[in-house]
Amino acid sequence: MAVQPEDQAVTKERNPYRIVQALLKEAVQTLGLPYDVYEILSYPHRFVEVNIPVRRDNGQLQVFTGYRAQHTHVLGPAKGGIRFHPGVTADEVKALAMWMSFKTAVAGLPFGGAKGGVVVDPRQLSLRELEELARGYIRGLAEYLGPHIDIPAPDVGTNERIMGWMMDEYERVVRRNDPGVLTGKPLILGGSYGRAEATGRGVVLCINEAAERLGMKLRQATVAIQGFGNVGGHTARLLHAMGVKVVAVVDIEGGLYDPEGLDIPGLLEHAARRGSVAGFPQGDPITSKELFQLDVDVVVPAALENQIDAEVAQGMRCRIVAEAANGPTTPDGDAVLKEKGIFVIPDILCNSGGVTVSYFEWVQNLTQYYWGEEEISQRLARQMKNAFARVFSMHREMQTDMRHAAYLVAVRQLAQAMAARGMIPPIG
């Protein structure tokens, strides 16, 4: 049975779950795979919802809703972050789990995809309340987790401290030492060197690979970054260290633009103290929408989903969009970028540095043999360059855009694993 083309209404779709299903369908159709591949991969293997009671500091009990989606295990245990954010939805978590499956397949890692989230603004919780929430989330999901089942990691609103609490709670539940159950942990608990900056480093490696293939001299380029958290901040720092001019950054509270280049080390110190780039004494104020319209060489969306729609894309003048965030471009925005000839490094390739170093951490936990920072950086560079080369080769071979090429690489890898397991007939 042939896969039918997606309805034109999908181009205006904003639901991330529908978006990733449409991208999957397009890849299955292009590769001529059995419809079964789409049917199996278009839904998560398992989806769990938990209610987490937390006693607030004022004595009141508040119940928070948490989710965990495990998309597929055909390549290995499920892998994916946990986000604490007020905008978390069930469909978002399912979509992000699917994206993780495609991301790990593109990166060549022995993982399936998973994602978790809690509907909460962590900034509104005290440290004690946050710890109680984190531990309650793990207690509710412990039976579905494990180093050979599902391995969570930090995401938006969580960090290595929270991973430490979660690992400790999991080990209390299962009554054994099991550091490989989570990645992104503190070093003292089995974390890996290079994990904090891994996603940003991977973004920079991808930008460098793209610049080389486009004949762009990166050290003469200008860059604008939306989002200045862990990923955006490290991306800015690493680009600045290479001599690249970062001219604009925006976060949730404000933004700055200086065509001569921002003082990134000073801005990072300011953001660490204040929690935002707002109030930094350099540059002119700028909004996210204005940042996307700047005449720069590279734009890095490093915030949340659906930031670049058709209207925003129409005014963009950059040569490269490096998707450090998950799903930052809507389908109609993507169509405009393609029409304008802007080279997009898709999210499932561009931001896979984080899960790659998470894989290194997991391997180190299982073997109890730990690598130094230099070895981590070298292994990450090799893995990212190989992943970029695979996608770029598919892009050239199929004469398609990089996003479609990345999905073709990922879906072919997953389909081959499904065929080897006997889930679908053998494929050519």
Image (cartoon, helix red, strand yellow):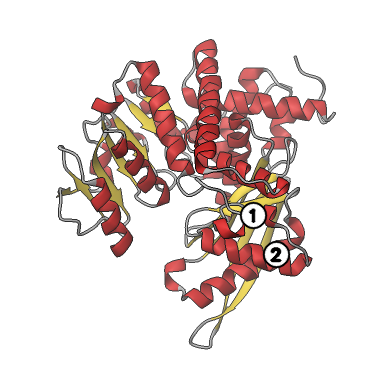
Number of dots carrying numbers: 2
Residue drawn 78% across the image and 67% down it: 175
Amino acid at the residue labelled 1: Leu
Q: Is residue 58 at all visible to an observer of this figure?
A: yes
Camera-nearest residue between 93 and 108? 108
Camera-nearest residue between 151 and 362? 362
Q: Are marks 1 and 2 in contact (CB under 8 Å)?
A: yes
Name the residue tied to disc 2.
170
Q: Quadrant of residue 97?
A: top right
Pointer 1: residues within 10 angstroms few (<14), some, or many (20+)? many
Q: Quadrant of the C terminus?
A: top right
Pointer 2: residues within 10 angstroms few (<14), some, or many (20+)? many
Question: Which mark is drawn over residue 342?
Answer: none
Q: Is residue 205 left or right of residue 100?
A: left
Q: Earlier in the sequence, mark 1 or mark 2?
A: 2
* Residue 322: x %, y % from top left: 39, 33
Task: Tell me: residue 163, above or below residue 63.
Answer: above
Q: Quadrant of the N terminus?
A: top right
Question: Which mark is drawn over residue 182?
Answer: 1
* Residue 43: x %, y % from top left: 68, 42
Q: CA distance from mark 1 to mark 2?
A: 9 Å
Residue drawn 50% across the image and 59% down it: 158
Q: Is residue 50 left or right of residue 175?
A: left
Residue drawn 35% across the image and 38% down it: 300
Amino acid at the residue labelled 2: Tyr
* Residue 2: x %, y % from top left: 69, 21
* Residue 246: x %, y % from top left: 25, 39
Q: Quadrant of residue 172?
A: bottom right
Residue drawn 48% across the image and 38% down it: 351
